[in-house]
Image (cartoon, helix red, strand yellow):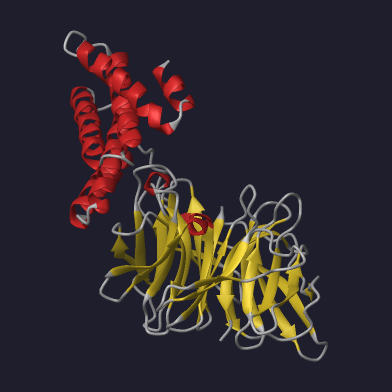
């Protein structure tokens, strides 16, 4: 009952309701050491009171989160199979980490976040390891005919153009858009023929592109688009479908090598695709409790993939893949990162992450710069970045990012100065920018 009452009250009154619940329930604990329902309720009350106190008193919030962690830890020590309380323990540790981060104690925050992730992973049911047959797959596309694109863009890409992968939404198929920053003109390069949804785009050149998404039948698909100068038209052709592709999330291209990040239950898989045969090869799999953000390549030949978990208490990191050894290593973890859903790289090798911050941290988002030593720095922070979907880098100074639509707020395209942190919203007319999910700056 107190949860319902507290949730309906104004923020300034919630604390009093939760405080009464905490005092009552804590008083019942000594005489009810085996009544798990009372212990569950006491932990929930401390977690709720901590959040209510957070805007007014960090010390009080930290005390309540620590108390919740302590109570949950006692239950888990008695019953290691109690997955509900192990989850509550992870939440309490994550919220305690937030206090440490607010006060600049990032090492302590990272330690607590690491503990929270480990607790969650103990209750996660791991998918069975791939069998040898599942490590490779051939293309299974209903049609692999090359056809003219259903778009109105009749030119090859120009240096400085911005490619925007627009997801399917409301029954409207996804579309690949071309935006000219100089004239602010927008054209449609491709829509609706082979892909009903477009999740990411990789550029091979100004006349060759690769798009990852879903086909009209629902299978994961990669489509190649190429510009035919003789006809002055773009053509598109599926190069691989189905097989290992469950839920494509990101794609990167470099030196005739195509690597895709695919969401597979509670982990992410990295899959190589042969551009000639469409053959798919599993290159690596991340730890459990990770969702893929975006993948980029570096001049050194490595690939970087951002990982996050949408639930409270999970990981936030960027991993490096060596395509030759297929080894994964951590390039950046925790710190300023909460949900690094977007990723790009500057010419000098710094990573630029589009980061959705945890809702309890004020409902903002941020653009985070990570240098080659792993040092993180917030470039820009704002409420609209809580809906960031994609980031692209034009130079050491110029970047672009896109945001998803929300109630009373349209999807947006922004230009960002990476040195000054100044952001500028770009006016988009015609309603083409519906659900942007990928950005590529054309060099």
Most extreme residue toward the right, as rendered?
Answer: 231
Q: Quadrant of residue 230?
A: bottom right
Q: Which residue lies most toward the front here?
A: 12
Position in image of residue 297 (x %, y %): 44, 76
196 up-or-down from 362: above or below? below
The percent coordinates of residue 102 (x first, y second) are 27, 52
Residue furthest to the bottom in view is 230
Residue 96 sits in quarter: top left
Position of the N terminus, as image quadrant, is top left
Task: Answer whether residue 408 is visible to the viewer in this image.
Answer: yes
Look at the image and tell me in which quarter the C terminus lies.
bottom right
Answer with left or right where residue 242 lies relative to residue 43.
right
26 relative position to 362: left or right: left
- Left of 321 or right of it: where is 435? right
**Pick the front one: 56 or 156:** 56
292 lies above or below 343: above
Q: Looking at the image, which is closer to me, 222 or 351?
A: 351
Residue at image position (58%, 66%) is: 438
Residue at image location 74% in from the left, 70% down from the top: 190
Provide residue 34's location: percent of width, then percent of height.
22, 11
Residue for point 56% across, 70% down: 414
Where residue 343 sits: x, y (%)?
45, 67
Q: How many marks?
A: 0
Instruction: Give me the residue at 33% from left, 42% from top.
Output: 55
Query: Residue 270 versus residue 307: which sits nearer the camera?
Result: 307
- The vertical placement of 215 against 128, above or below, is below
The answer to whether residue 199 of the structure is visible from this angle is no
């Amino acid at each position: 009952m107190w949860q319902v009452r507290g949730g309906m009250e104004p923020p300034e009154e919630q604390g009093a309701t939760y405080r009464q619940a905490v005092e009552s329930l804590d008083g019942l604990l000594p005489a009810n050491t085996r009544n798990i329902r009372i212990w569950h309720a006491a932990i929930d009350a401390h977690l709720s009171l901590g959040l209510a106190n957070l805007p007014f008193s960090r010390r009080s919030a930290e005390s309540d989160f620590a108390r919740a962690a302590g109570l949950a830890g006692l239950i888990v020590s008695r019953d290691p199979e109690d997955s509900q309380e192990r989850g509550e323990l992870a939440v309490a540790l994550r919220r305690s980490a937030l206090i440490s981060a607010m006060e600049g104690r990032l090492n302590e925050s990272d330690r607590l976040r690491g503990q929270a992730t480990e607790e969650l992973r103990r209750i996660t049911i791991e998918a069975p390891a791939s069998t040898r047959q599942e490590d490779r797959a051939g293309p299974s596309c209903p049609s692999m005919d090359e056809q003219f694109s259903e778009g109105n863009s009749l030119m090859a890409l120009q240096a400085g153009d911005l490619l925007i992968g627009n997801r399917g939404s409301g029954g409207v198929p996804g579309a690949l858009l071309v935006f000219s920053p100089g004239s602010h003109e927008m054209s449609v390069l491709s829509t609706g023929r082979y892909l009903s949804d477009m999740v990411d785009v990789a550029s091979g050149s100004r006349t060759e592109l690769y798009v990852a998404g879903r086909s009209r039948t629902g299978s994961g698909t990669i489509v190649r688009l190429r510009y035919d100068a003789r006809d002055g038209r773009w053509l598109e052709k599926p190069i691989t479908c189905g097989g290992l592709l469950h839920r494509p999330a990101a794609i990167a291209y470099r030196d005739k090598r195509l690597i895709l990040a695919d969401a597979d239950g509670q982990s992410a898989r990295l899959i190589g695709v042969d551009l000639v045969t469409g053959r798919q090869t599993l290159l690596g799999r991340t730890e459990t409790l990770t969702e893929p953000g975006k993948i980029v390549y570096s001049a050194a030949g490595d690939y970087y993939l951002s990982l996050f978990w949408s639930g409270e208490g999970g990981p936030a990191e960027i991993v490096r893949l060596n395509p030759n050894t297929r080894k994964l290593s951590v390039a950046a973890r925790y710190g300023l990162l909460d949900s690094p859903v977007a990723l790009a790289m500057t010419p000098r090798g710094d990573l630029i992450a589009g980061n959705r911050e945890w809702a309890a941290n004020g409902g903002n988002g941020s653009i985070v710069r990570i240098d080659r030593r792993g040092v993180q720095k917030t470039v820009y922070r704002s409420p609209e970045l809580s809906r960031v979907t994609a980031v692209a880098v034009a130079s050491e100074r110029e970047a672009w990012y896109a945001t998803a639509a929300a109630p009373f707020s349209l999807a947006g395209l922004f230009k960002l100065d990476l040195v000054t942190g100044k952001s500028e919203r770009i006016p988009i007319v015609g309603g083409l920018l519906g659900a942007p999910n990928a950005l590529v700056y054309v060099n």
